[in-house]
């Protein structure tokens, strides 16, 4: 049975990192796979950063989102530098009203990619953001870099708009979450077919 959890709710939370890395290696080319120490450092800075999918206690997918500093947010939208495993703990903030998020990565084991796991993870992420907003922490903007066609489809299905394309390396997407939340526009709508 598929279970979706938030990393903040996991006991022995640091133990999730090897599982995250195993999934990355099956989904991404080596250039887009994180190193243990950098993932660990970011996670220790803020553990409230993952939606995790499990099948019978085996991790099968994850969605990583980071509350980021204003400096990193402006660098992401204004430069052509791709950021992934080079994001440092100093670039990660706590949650506060008006924080910006960077949707760093989403990875699902190939066997589960054409199932509703992606929808369940998206719904959990959306519910998570709604709960934060109801507690006075409304996310301002969410940016995301897509490095695969499936990643682009996923972001478009959630309502993200292309901000820029950079030399066949990646596409930067943007969603003004705060504006959508305040106007009652559906937030993070998903495609029922998955991605």
Image: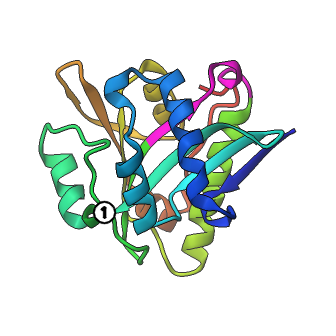
Residue 95 included in the magenta stretch of the image = no
Front residue (pair 84, 178): 84
Q: Position of residue 51 (x, y in %)?
A: 61, 51
Question: Tag 1's secondary structure?
Answer: helix
- Assign the N terminus to one quadrant of the image: top right
Q: Residue at x 42, y 45 (%)?
A: 36
Query: How busy is the neighbourhood of tag 1: few (under 14 within 10 Å), some, or many (20 plus)?
Result: some
Q: Which residue is mark 1?
A: 89
The image quadrant that residue 146 belongs to is top left
The answer to whether 126 is drawn above or below residue 95 in the figure is above
Q: Which residues are magenta?
A: 105-115
Q: Is residue 110 magenta?
A: yes
* Left or right: 145 as drawn, with respect to 21: left
Side of 3 relative to 112 (left or right): right
Rendering quarter of residue 170: top left
Q: Is residue 33 left or right of residue 137?
A: left
Q: Quadrant of the C terminus?
A: top right
Residue 68 in view of the camera? yes
- Residue drawn at x 60%, y 76% as measured from the top left: 134
Q: Is residue 132 above or below residue 118?
A: below
Give whichever of 61, 20 is nearer the camera. 20
Where residue 167 sits: x, y (%)? 17, 21
Residue 29, position as x, y percentages in the image? 39, 20
Closer-to-camera residue (142/61): 61
Instruction: Say which residue appears at 69% left-offset and 20% top-offset.
Output: 114
Residue 78 in the image: above or below residue 138 = above
């Amino acid at each position: 049975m598929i279970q979706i959890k938030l990393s903040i709710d996991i006991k022995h939370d640091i133990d999730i990192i090897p599982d995250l890395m195993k999934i990355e290696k099956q989904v991404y080319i080596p250039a887009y796979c994180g190193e243990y120490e950098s993932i660990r450092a970011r996670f220790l800075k803020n553990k409230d950063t993952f939606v995790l999918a499990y099948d019978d206690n085996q991790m099968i997918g994850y969605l990583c989102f980071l509350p980021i500093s204003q400096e990193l947010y402006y660098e992401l939208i204004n430069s052509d530098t791709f950021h992934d495993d080079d994001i440092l703990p100093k670039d990660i903030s706590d949650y506060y009203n008006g924080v910006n998020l960077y949707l760093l990565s989403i990875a699902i084991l190939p066997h589960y990619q054409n199932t509703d796991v992606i929808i369940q993870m998206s719904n959990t992420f959306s519910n998570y953001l709604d709960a934060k907003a109801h507690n006075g922490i409304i996310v301002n903007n969410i940016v995301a870099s897509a490095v695969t066609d499936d990643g682009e489809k996923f972001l478009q299905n959630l309502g993200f708009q292309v901000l820029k394309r950079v030399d066949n390396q990646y596409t930067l997407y943007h969603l003004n979450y705060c504006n959508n939340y305040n106007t009652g526009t559906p937030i993070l709508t998903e495609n029922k077919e998955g991605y």
